[in-house]
Amino acid sequence: MGFQLKITSFHLDVLKEVGNIGAAHAATSLSSLLGKKIDMVVPKVEMVSFDDMMELAGGPDEIVVGIYLRIEGDASGGMFFVLPIPQANRFIQRLIHDDSFDFEKPPLSELGLSAMQELGNILSGSYLSALSDFTKLNLYPTPPALTVDMVGAIISFGLVELSAVSDYAIVIDTSIFEEDLEEEVKGHFFLLPDPDSFQVIFSSLGVE
């Protein structure tokens, strides 16, 4: 039985704690970037099938903004951050002070695309840094790749190798609360350790 099938609620609670620490770091960076108070929490971490993962992101045909990076070092794998188009637009419009920016209306400005990559850098980098601190593993992110496409197309890109040996991914729900706005921004991190890395990560977290 693969290690991923042995993952318990306790393992997920540990990952949730790591996620909340990463979210706190990301919120601090985002607050500085946007010049206003940003809070982030991780309400839930769960293990889901690849099919359920796509449904969580809105369904395979839903157009979203996706950021993908590889994790390299002592444990390898992939990480996605998927954000609905309206919420991605809102963040970038505020970052670049341009209300006309819209991911659904190309051509997109280089400034807006760079801002989205920076947002992905902050979010994914904060989580990976927290995971690295907790596990004492050397984990390095590759530069993030930004894509606007259907959920199915984006996620399938990262599943080519993993899908041969596993059907599951770890989902880290992320809620972002922006000062002066009642609506929360909901994004999803999909953490896909390579098959051999599940054991490495959880052993380093002190759970077997």
Image (cartoon, rainbow, N blue to C red):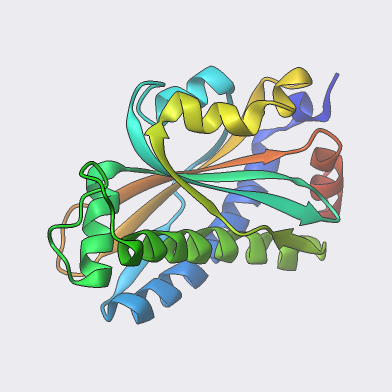
Q: How many marks?
A: 0
Residue 168, position as x, y percentages in the image = 65, 25
Residue at the image position 42 percent from the left and 57 percent from the top: 41
Q: Quadrant of the C terminus?
A: top right
The furthest residue to the front:
107
Q: Quadrant of residue 158?
A: top right
Query: Where is the N terminus found, in terms of image quarters?
Result: top right
Decide if residue 92 is on the left or right side of residue 49: left
Query: Toward which corner of the image does residue 194 lie, by quadrant?
Result: top right
Residue 119 is situated, as x and y percent measured from the top left of the image, at 42, 63
Residue ID at (54%, 44%): 80
Of 67 and 199, nearer the camera is 67
Q: Camera-side residue: 108 or 205?
A: 108
Q: Could you say where residue 79 lies in the image, as x and y percent from the top left?
A: 61, 46
Of residues 80 and 174, the one nearer the viewer is 80
Residue 162: quarter of image: top right
Q: Is residue 184 visible?
A: no
- Looking at the image, residue 194 sits to the left or right of residue 20; the answer is right
Q: Indicate the position of residue 89 as horizontal and vertical percent values.
A: 24, 53
47 left or right, relative to 3 = left
Q: Residue at x 27, y 43 (%)?
A: 85
Toward the viewer: 198 or 78? 78
Residue 24 sits above or below residue 60 on the image: below
- Horizontal arrangement in the rendering, residue 68 relative to residue 103 (left or right): right
Q: Indicate whether 114 appears above or below 170.
A: below
